[in-house]
Image (spheres, helix red, strand yellow):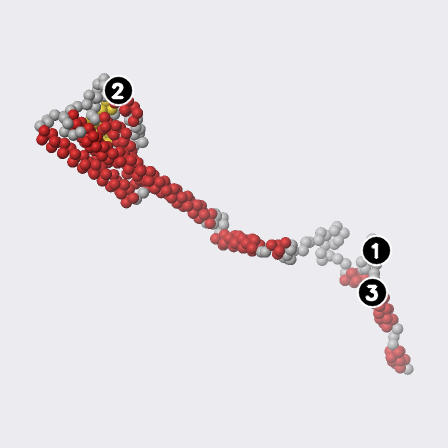
C-alpha cells in the first residue's frame, strides 16, 4: 500500500520521523469497504494524536463490529459501539464549546487572522472503514484547529501560557481515552469471541461423535435387527457379570475360584456306519436260521481270562450249580413219570 502521508517541503524531517516512529500501520487484514478522506493537520499535538491513536481505534472498532457479530449476538456488540459513540460525541461537544469561546474573544479584540506553524502540515488521504473512525477523524481535525486558535490567543496575550496548557490538556486526554477505551473493549470482546468459538467447536465435535455412535448402533448390511439385539444383550450380560465381580469383597475373591459350571452338553451325533469286510456277505444274503443256530462264534485266541474277585467267583460257582441241576432234571425222568409209564405197559 502506498504511503498515506505526503510532505511537500524540505521541513518535513519532523513529520518523517513522527511517521516512521508511530505511523507504521498494517491495514491488510481489514477487508471492509473504505472511504478516502483528504486530511491536513498543522499542530504538532494533533499530528501525534492522529498518528498514535487513529488507526488503533479504527482497528479495534473493526474487530468489535465485524468479527464480534460473526460469533456473538447483535445485542452483545451494540453496547460497545454505543459507548464509543457517546465518548466521541461528548469530546466533540467540549471542543465546539471552546472554539466558540475563542471566536468570541477574537471578535471582541478585533483579531481577524490566525497564526501558523512553520512546520509543514501532514497531508493524508486517510482510509476510513467505519462511522466511528470518521467521527474520530473529525474530532482530531477540530482539535487541530483549536490548538492553532489557542496558540494565537497566547501570542496576543488573551490567555496566559498556563491557561493555554490547561485548555489543551482535557481535549488531548479525551482523544487518548477514547482510543484506550476501544482497546479495552477489544480485549474484552476477544475473550468473549474465543469462548464462543470454543463452544461452537465443542458442539461440532459432539455432533460428529453422536453421528459416529448412530452409525455404530445401526445394524450392518448382513445383520438383522434380531441378531443385533442378541449381540447387545450378550454384551450387556457380560458387562453385568464383570461389574458383579468388581463389586465382590476381597476375601471372596481370595478364597479361590468357586464351583465350576457344568460344561454345555454336546449335541448327539448320528452313529457311524461300520465298514463291511471282504469276507462278510452282503446284507440279506447269509446262512439259514438253523445253520445260524448251530454256528458258535469262535473264541478269539488272543482273549485272556480275566481275574475275578472272591464275590464274583462265588456268584459264578452258584450259577454253574444251578445250570447243572437244570440239566439233570431234564435228563432223568421223575418218579411220577416212571410209575405212569409202567401202568401203561401193564
Pick the quarter of the image with the C terminus.
bottom right
Q: Which residue is mark 2?
A: 13
Image coords of residue 244 (percent x, y): 56, 56
Residue depicted at 23% across the width and 26% down the height:
44
Return the residue nearer the eye: 114 or 249: 114
Query: Given contact means CB atoms under 8 Å apart, are the residues at marks 3 and 2 in contact?
Result: no
Nearer the N terminus, badge 2 or badge 1? 2
- Residue 273 can be seen, yes or no: yes
**Label 1, label 3: how many angstroms apart (C-alpha)?**
20 Å
Disc marking residue 209:
none
In the visual, does 301 lie left or right of 193? Answer: right
Where does residue 30 sit, x and y in percent of width and height?
29, 32
Is label 2 in a helix, a strand or a loop? helix
How far across and how far down the image is residue 150, in percent? 17, 29
Front residue of 310/336: it is: 310
Q: For mark 3, what is the residue?
A: 311
The answer to whether 279 is drawn above or below residue 345 in the figure is above
For residue 215, above or below residue 252: above
Q: Between disc 1 and disc 3, whose residue precedes? A: 1
User: What residue do we see at 65% from left, 54% from top?
Assistant: 256
Kindly report the distance in space between the C-alpha atoms of the residues bearing marks 2 and 1: 133 Å
Task: Please rate how many residues cluster around mark 3, counting C-alpha atoms within 10 Å: few if below 14, some from 14 to 19, many from 20.
Answer: few
What residue does disc 1 label? Answer: 304
Name the residue at the top extreme: 10
Closer to the eye: label 2 or 1: 2
Amino acid at each position: 500500500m502506498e504511503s498515506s502521508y505526503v510532505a511537500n517541503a524540505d521541513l518535513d524531517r519532523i513529520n518523517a520521523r513522527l511517521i516512521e516512529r508511530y505511523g507504521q500501520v498494517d491495514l491488510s487484514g481489514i477487508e471492509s469497504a473504505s472511504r478516502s478522506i483528504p486530511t491536513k493537520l498543522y499542530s504538532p499535538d494533533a499530528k501525534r494524536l492522529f498518528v498514535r491513536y487513529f488507526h488503533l481505534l479504527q482497528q479495534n472498532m473493526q474487530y468489535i463490529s465485524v468479527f464480534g457479530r460473526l460469533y456473538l449476538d447483535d445485542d452483545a456488540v451494540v453496547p460497545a459501539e454505543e459507548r464509543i459513540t457517546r465518548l466521541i460525541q461528548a469530546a466533540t461537544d467540549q471542543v465546539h464549546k471552546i472554539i466558540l469561546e475563542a471566536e468570541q474573544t477574537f471578535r471582541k479584540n478585533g483579531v481577524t487572522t490566525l497564526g501558523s506553524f512553520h512546520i509543514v502540515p501532514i497531508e493524508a488521504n486517510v482510509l476510513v472503514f467505519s462511522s466511528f473512525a470518521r467521527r474520530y477523524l473529525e474530532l482530531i481535525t477540530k482539535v487541530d484547529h483549536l490548538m492553532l486558535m489557542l496558540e494565537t490567543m497566547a501570542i496576543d496575550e488573551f490567555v496566559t501560557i498556563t491557561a493555554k496548557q490547561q485548555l489543551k490538556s482535557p481535549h488531548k486526554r479525551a482523544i487518548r481515552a477514547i482510543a484506550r477505551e476501544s482497546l479495552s473493549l477489544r480485549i474484552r470482546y476477544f475473550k468473549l469471541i474465543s469462548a464462543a468459538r470454543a463452544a461452537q467447536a465443542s458442539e461440532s465435535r459432539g455432533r460428529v461423535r453422536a453421528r459416529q455412535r448412530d452409525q455404530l448402533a445401526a445394524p450392518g448390511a448382513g445383520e438383522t435387527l434380531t441378531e443385533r439385539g442378541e449381540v447387545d444383550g450378550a454384551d450387556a450380560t457380560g458387562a453385568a457379570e464383570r461389574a458383579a465381580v468388581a463389586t465382590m469383597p476381597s476375601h471372596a475373591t481370595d478364597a479361590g475360584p468357586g464351583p465350576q459350571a457344568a460344561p454345555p452338553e454336546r449335541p448327539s451325533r448320528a452313529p457311524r456306519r461300520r465298514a463291511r469286510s471282504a469276507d462278510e456277505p452282503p446284507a440279506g444274503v447269509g446262512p439259514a436260521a438253523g445253520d445260524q443256530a448251530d454256528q458258535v462264534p469262535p473264541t478269539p485266541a488272543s482273549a485272556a481270562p480275566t481275574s475275578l474277585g472272591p464275590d464274583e467267583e462265588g456268584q459264578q460257582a452258584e450259577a454253574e450249580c444251578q445250570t447243572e441241576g437244570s440239566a439233570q432234571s431234564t435228563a432223568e425222568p421223575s418218579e411220577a413219570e416212571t410209575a405212569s409209564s409202567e401202568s401203561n405197559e401193564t
